[in-house]
Amino acid sequence: MFQFSFMYGDVIYLPYSLGMLWAYAKTFQRITDKIKNNAFTIIREDPDRIVEQIIDPDIVAFSTYVWNFEMSLAVAKLIKRKHPECLVVFGGPQIPNTDRLGDFFLKYPFIDIVVHGEGEITFSEILLAYANDSDYKDIAGITHRGNSTDDRPRTKDLSIFPSPYLTGVFDDLIKLPYTYHTIWETDRGCPYRCTFCDWGSLTGQKMYQFSEDRVYAELELFAQMKIAYVFMGNANFGIYPRDVEIAQRAVDINIKYNGYPQKIRANFTKNSSSRVFDIAKLFNAHGLDKGITLSVQSLDEVTLKTIKRSNMKFDTLSSFVQQYTKENIDTLIELIIGLPGETYSSFKSNLEDLLAIGAHNSIAIYNCTLLPNAPMSDTKYVKDNGIKTRPTPIMLSHASMNDPIQEYEETVVQTKTLSEEDIKQCVLMSWAVQAFHTLGLTQAMSICLYIKYNIAYTVFYEHLIKYAMQFPDTVMGQEYTAVREKVDNNFDATDTVPEYNTQEWILSEASCLRIHLQLDTFFNEIPAFLAFLQASIGMSVDDEFLADITTYQRAIIITCNNGTTEFTLNNPVHTIFHDGLANRSPNLHPIKNTLQISDPNNFDGDISRFATEIVHHGRRGGQALHYDVAVTY
Ligand code: B12
Ligand code: SF4
């Protein structure tokens, strides 16, 4: 059975979906009498090498997602060539629904059966048919060499599916020398229907729950296995009242097992409620999750209507962000570029509004992609919204590089309201905001200019881009050129920075890391950029204030070589910055002040550790800057 996953260093996910299939299949004696599951193959390697190790297979089953489809095809094709009698079965969210299959079987003649949607029962029926030498025509939810059967209704009673963790399905796999992450499902399905999403083909569907006994037993087992990281497969954690109890139990288990599992990452229900706030507080207090993701995707009314998503009101979002900030809980707000209905100007307003409510450390922006079964991929929807897509290299932030097979995603490159160049401008704007603001390089400067001179954040960053375009030899200019090339090169969304390590970084992180390698040059060029900004917007800012914010900004950036710094300013920049962060009205009057910063990180020049802790893990929590500064007036 194959479920290829990317590796993050030596970390990899246990193949939960296949585990669910096999745990259920094992409940049929006829299957275990006749069929042996030889292995779960999850590591991406040269397909020839993988196939060489498979001896006389009768059935091979692939669990396919956007991130492993090409790899799965390559291996399946080789298997069929070498073992023509072998039954090749594909399933998973990357398998188009029956009405969207098109020429699938012509393109991939080496696949015998595809399974649509939820797979446990269907897969067992296929195995039983194989074991009994019967045909597949009465098995619901499949297409067998082009012949589709009726859809299979969802399973309401999830208790019929044993847990792969509790039934020892992964016992052999976990002997391999990897660090495993696990997927933990406490319920299935999502009642919403956002058009860009295909939540495992369970969107617009009723939700069903796994029993509390089961989910607690699984979590306790994860703790005993010393699993560090648990990713919840739920779409809407926090939607049920029992979810608070589940969170409390997770905390109890974490305490009982001395900190295991260390982290639990949940997709919280989208219209964040006070229940979600309670769960986030619990997780945060016990270090189980540092923050909460608020997936707003867009703030624009027309766009939200077009993608059939009803977000919480902007005021509610704003008060949530402030509430979370007050409790010291990080928030990560997600936006998507290229949604139908969005324009360049509405996208820019999204960014401006989010920064204005204080989302300075926490905006994550993704490109819109078409998933095979998402409502957005419907031919009429595509036509009505003028959507054009292109296969682009899949964005795999932080995965280890040097992979044998390139995976692709269908990125939206044009809509009725966004030309391809508009989408590129959105990508560049997002890059600028994330690389320079979220990751700290110019955050304090832009906040101080916003507070004191009302210079909008997007005006600051739009001019940063313009400056970088006009002065390609500057540090900003070099980064702009590198990123523009990536964007022009088929919307490539990741890059590597070999000076640090071998992983893939998203473009903004890669830029930030490269700028850190020449931070002094970057700051020597800042006065010229600030002069350019003033000239372009026809505004004159006090020189001493500009000099102070530049000195302050440089000093608070955490680097891998910080020691203790002391310096004097003529303006209360620290107060302005912090009042700005907390959305308070600051005292703007000049006053001489001395600031002292000592660095608790002790990276001692270890740039790889710096990159991991500050840029990779710290990104979400605003770890890039020293907020703790001693000021004397
Ligand atoms: C956990 C998770 C992750 C984890 C780990 C993934 C991993 N390596 O296993 C992480 C955080 C890394 C991740 C990342 C991404 N993910 Co993700 N993720 C999920 C999530 C929340 C749970 C997956 C899961 O295990 N579900 C529970 C199992 C039981 O359901 P299932 O996988 O669908 O399997 C059932 C059926 O599909 C079928 N089936 C599956 N395989 C097979 C095989 C056979 C032979 C058969 C018969 C049946 C069958 O039967 C299974 C049991 O019913 C899903 C959403 C969801 N709830 O489905 C998204 C989801 C899988 N992710 C998705 C995406 C797009 C991504 C990303 C590309 C980025 C993004 N925008 O989210 C990244 C990058 C991926 C990467 N690996 O590098 C999409 C995938 C769509 C697609 N067509 O592939 C999903 C569906 C969410 C969505 N937006 O719609 N993800
Ligand atoms: S984006 Fe979230 S809320 Fe919307 S359909 Fe997908 S899982 Fe459900």
Image (spheres, helix red, strand yellow):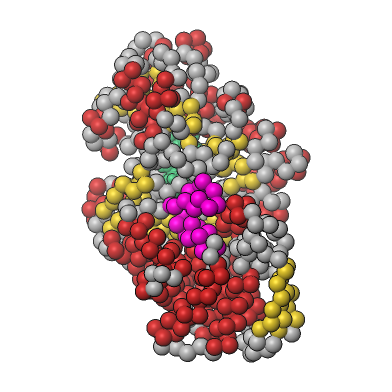
Residue 325 falls in image quadrant: bottom right
Spot occupied by residue 133 in the image (x, y as percentages of width and height)? 36, 10
For the point 37% across and 52% down, which residue is it?
A: 492
For the point 51% across and 32% down, which residue is it?
A: 15
Please state the extent of the stretch shown in magenta in the rendering. 494-516
For the point 43% across and 55% down, which residue is it?
A: 366
* Numbered circles on residues, count: 0
Q: In this view, does 193 lie to the left or right of 213?
A: left
Q: Is residue 479 magenta?
A: no
Spot occupied by residue 112 in the image (x, y as percentages of width and height)? 31, 23
- Residue sitting nearer the eye, 5 or 144: 5
Q: In this view, does 34 lie to the left or right of 174?
A: left
Report the quarter where the C terminus lies.
bottom right
Spot occupied by residue 590 in the image (x, y as percentages of width and height)? 64, 89
Is 612 above or below relative to 472?
above
Is 63 above or below relative to 502?
above
Is 498 above or below relative to 582?
above
For the point 37% across and 56% down, which residue is it?
A: 486
The answer, for residue 100, to whether it is visible in the render is yes
Q: In this view, does 597 lie to the left or right of 399?
A: right
- Residue sitting nearer the eye, 216 or 150: 216
Q: Is residue 509 magenta?
A: yes
Is 25 above or below relative to 321?
above
Spot occupied by residue 195 in the image (x, y as percentages of width and height)? 36, 51
- Residue sitting nearer the eye, 207 or 597: 597
The answer, for residue 465, to whether it is visible in the render is no
